[in-house]
Image: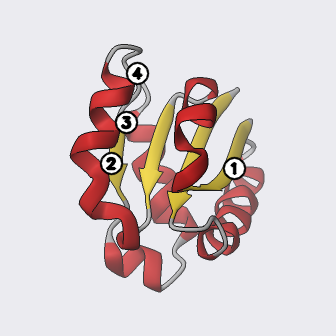
């Protein structure tokens, strides 16, 4: 089971993307757990995941959030703005999976 965390300013806009990613994972027969959280919940939630993807609105926090996850070896990356805006669940899922070791 792969675990993916999406993080944005409030966790709302990424929720739609989570649904698209989950639908794509089901279509491919992949076992994944994908959740969305607001950045205020980051510290509490990130240890439960193998990768964290940031929405464009919190991309500026990438460096500071990556420092928090580095000790546990959890990659943090920003979601491509076009993929995010177009709600391309397939592309974002592929990106997340490529970051999981």
Q: Position of residue 98 (x, y in %)?
A: 38, 39
* Secondary structure at numbered mark 4: loop
Look at the picture and state if 77 lies above or below 56. Answer: above
Using the numbered discs, state the Cα–Cα distance from disc 3 to disc 1 in whole angstroms. Answer: 16 Å
Residues under numbered marks 3 and 2 in contact, where contact means CB atoms less than 8 Å apart: yes
Q: Which mark is residue 81?
A: none
**Residue sitting at x 27%, y 30%:** 67
Callout 2: few (<14), some (14-19), or many (20+) C-alpha neighbours within 10 Å?
Answer: some
Using the numbered discs, state the Cα–Cα distance from disc 3 to disc 4 in whole angstroms. Answer: 6 Å
Callout 3: few (<14), some (14-19), or many (20+) C-alpha neighbours within 10 Å?
Answer: some
Callout 4: few (<14), some (14-19), or many (20+) C-alpha neighbours within 10 Å?
Answer: few
Quarter of the rendering containing residue 85: bottom left
Q: Position of residue 59 (x, y in %)?
A: 30, 62
Using the numbered discs, state the Cα–Cα distance from disc 2 to disc 4 in whole angstroms. Answer: 14 Å
Using the numbered discs, state the Cα–Cα distance from disc 3 to disc 2 in whole angstroms. Answer: 9 Å
Q: Which mark is residue 101?
A: 4
The residue indicated by pointer 3 is 99
Look at the picture and state if 37 lies above or below 32. Answer: below
Left or right position of 11 against 87: right
């Amino acid at each position: 089971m792969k675990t993916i965390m999406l993080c944005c300013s409030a966790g709302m806009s990424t929720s739609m993307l989570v649904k698209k990613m989950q639908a794509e994972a089901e279509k491919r027969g992949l076992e994944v757990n994908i959740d969305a959280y607001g950045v205020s919940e980051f510290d509490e939630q990130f240890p439960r995941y193998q990768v964290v993807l940031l929405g464009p609105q919190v991309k500026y926090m990438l460096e500071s959030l990556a420092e928090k996850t580095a000790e546990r070896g959890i990659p943090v990356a920003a979601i491509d703005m076009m993929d995010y805006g177009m709600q391309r669940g397939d592309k974002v899922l592929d990106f997340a999976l490529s970051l999981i070791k």
